[in-house]
Image (cartoon, rainbow, N blue to C red):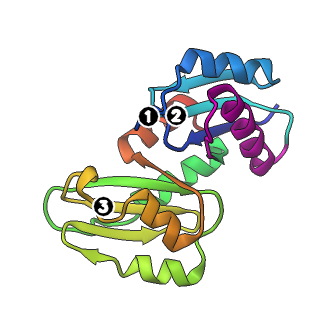
Amino acid sequence: MPTYIAFLRAVNVGGRFVKMAALRDALTQAGFADVQTHIQSGNVFVRSARRTSGPVALEVSRVITAHCGFDVPVVVRTPAQLRATLATVDGIPPMIDGDSKRYVAFADASVPPEAAAMLNTWDKPGERVRVLDAEVLAEMTIGFHKTTLTNTRLERLTGRTTTWRDLSVVRAIDEKWGA
């Protein structure tokens, strides 16, 4: 049975709280197998008879939205796609001098070329960005909560549903559930 990693957007922030045990139970009752979660920020591993990420994302979102009572957008990657993203990120040299931290925004589809061109020239103090097809790599010397490239702004610029993860969390997920 194929495996998938679902990244939930905006759970356990801003009053939108979800208990991971209840989320695992809801997904298991909906027919997903081997449901696991990683930390409280909405990282979910599932097995599904579905053969592509799109239907998995729609069904996970439908189940969790019904369970929680609020809309929970979901972006899905296979373990192999996640590993490929990390390999690409690891091949990109530092974009900012000094101490910085990297984040990855996972999008529900490829970033349109016009938006990618604009983001690839992003030059705000302490922030640089590189589009990697359906992911956006951000490197920051400022705290993530101080960035001008908020998720709302990224979604407005790209027309895509996106959700951010600290690169260290992405690496931990890959170690736990990777290809």
What residue is disc 1 on?
Answer: 172
Residue receiving disc 2? 42
Mark 1–mark 3 Cα distance, whole angstroms, equals 18 Å
Q: Nearer the viewer, mark 1 or mark 2?
A: 2
Q: Nearer the viewer, residue 164 or 150?
A: 150
Q: Residue at x 41, y 61 (%)?
A: 137
Residue located beneath label 3 in the image: 139
State the image coordinates of residue 76 (x, y, percent, origin top left).
65, 46
Looking at the image, is mark 3 or mark 2 nearer the viewer?
2
Identity of the residue drawn at 23% across and 56% down: 146
47 and 29: which one is in front?
29
Asked whether 179 falls inside the magenta stretch, the response is no
Residue 29 numbered tag: none
Q: Nearer the viewer, mark 1 or mark 3?
A: 3
**Type of residue at label 2?**
Gly
Q: Earlier in the sequence, mark 1 or mark 2?
A: 2
Spatial CA span between label 1 and label 2: 14 Å
Q: Residues within 10 Å of mark 3 (few under 14, many from 20)?
A: many
Specify start and end residues of the magenta stretch as a single range. Answer: 51-73
**Sequence-wise, which precedes: disc 1 or disc 3?**
3
Type of the residue with mark 1: Ala
Q: Quadrant of the N terminus?
A: top right
Task: Look at 19% across and 57% down and name the residue there.
Answer: 142
Vertical relation: 110 (above or below) 11: below
Q: Residues within 10 Å of mark 2 (few under 14, many from 20)?
A: many
